[in-house]
Image: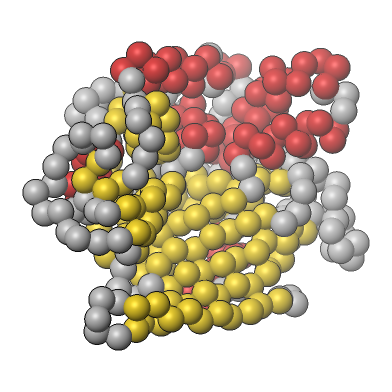
Amino acid sequence: IQTNQRHHQMSSKVGSGGTTKRRWFQKRIEVKCPKASGRNGTHCYLATTAILRQIPEIRSIKSGAINFFLNSPGGSLSVNENADPTVRTDMDGAMERMCEAGVGQNGMKDRNLQRAFKSSLFGQSLTLPVADGNILFGTWQGIYLCSWDDDRDDDGDNGGCPVRKITVTIYHEPSAQVRNVTVKPPERGVHSITAEIAKGFHLETKNGGAKSGKKQKMGQGVLYAMVKHTSASMGLTCVKPQDMKTLDKAFDNVVPEKWNDEFFIHTYEGPDDMPGHVKSSLFGVATSLPINGGEIDLPENVGLVLGEHRDVGWGHTRRVVGVKIT
């Protein structure tokens, strides 16, 4: 496999004590996706191993972040379950239903429109926290490479199997702070967790958020955060109570539990499980938060929220991991 790579080193002052090296590493890789076929075939490929074996450089990263950008059109990147393959089969089926609802019957006749719609739902970029040479996945998490135009062969010499180009960018900051924060959603739904995450990283929240009691004098920076579960999600949205309730209802409308009876295969963990997996990929599990003057610097009424998509999550704990670089 041929790769293009480049390195960049940047020096930045750290107080009055000198400088530290912050290293960027970038590399383009290619991943060959199996063709979808048969009832259990899927356009969603568990690509974690295929990706990581091409970037051994990650093993030298003490702390930092990694970005995956899909350079090939007609595909998506997501994080979801790495174990049961029926999750990926059902993810494909759910995407087909959402596409039908989104583009309409006439749109379903346009393959380019279908590909564009499906690609936009999951997105083409992931930024994930890294520490001690590993992406900080939860036990059951892995990278999904979804190839929505199964007939596309970028290089023309792979037997018709789709080949996807991914640009991998690693940011190494040895002095970054790595922490795990536990949050406890009280029930199924969308819940604001900005204050809990800020407290866990000794930050404050803008616009009068909860105080951590350990505010540090610091300049600008970023917090790369990820929830380590596959039936929960995390992202930024309006944190007014009614808006969070509306968002949760919208998730239920977009991914209804009646799909368990209609076509889902992965149904043996309860009616809320497979819909939870789909919602997790739709809203995402990772985000980047700006830091300014010791605060998570977000607009008014916007905050970090946890999507608890399972009824059995009531009273359970969800783990959020983050790498803070300042």
Q: Left or right? Give the position of 86 relative to 61.
A: right
Q: Total label count?
A: 0
Q: Can you say which quadrant of the picture contains the N terminus?
A: bottom right
Identify the residue at the far right of this view: 156
Q: Position of residue 99 (x, y in %)?
A: 71, 25
Give residue 201's quadrant in the image.
bottom left
Give residue 191's quadrant in the image.
top left
What colouring does the structure picture have? secondary structure
Q: Residue at x 42, y 36 (%)?
A: 236
Q: Nearer the viewer, residue 58 or 242?
A: 242
Visible in this render: residue 194? yes
Q: Nearer the viewer, residue 97 or 85?
A: 97
Q: Position of residue 55 (x, y in %)?
A: 56, 74
Q: Position of residue 291 (x, y in %)?
A: 33, 52
Q: Position of residue 117 (x, y in %)?
A: 72, 32
Identify the residue at the far bottom of this view: 18
Q: Residue at x 66, y 78 (%)?
A: 5
Residue 195 in the image: above or below residue 106:
below
Identify the residue at the far left of this view: 213
Q: Nearer the viewer, residue 20 or 31?
A: 20
Visible in this render: residue 260? no
Q: Left or right? Give the position of 27 relative to 313.
A: right
Q: Residue at x 56, y 29 (%)?
A: 265
Q: Can you say which quadrant of the picture contains the C terminus?
A: bottom left
Q: Residue at x 49, y 63 (%)?
A: 66
Residue 217 in the image: above or below residue 95:
below
Identify the residue at the far front of this view: 16
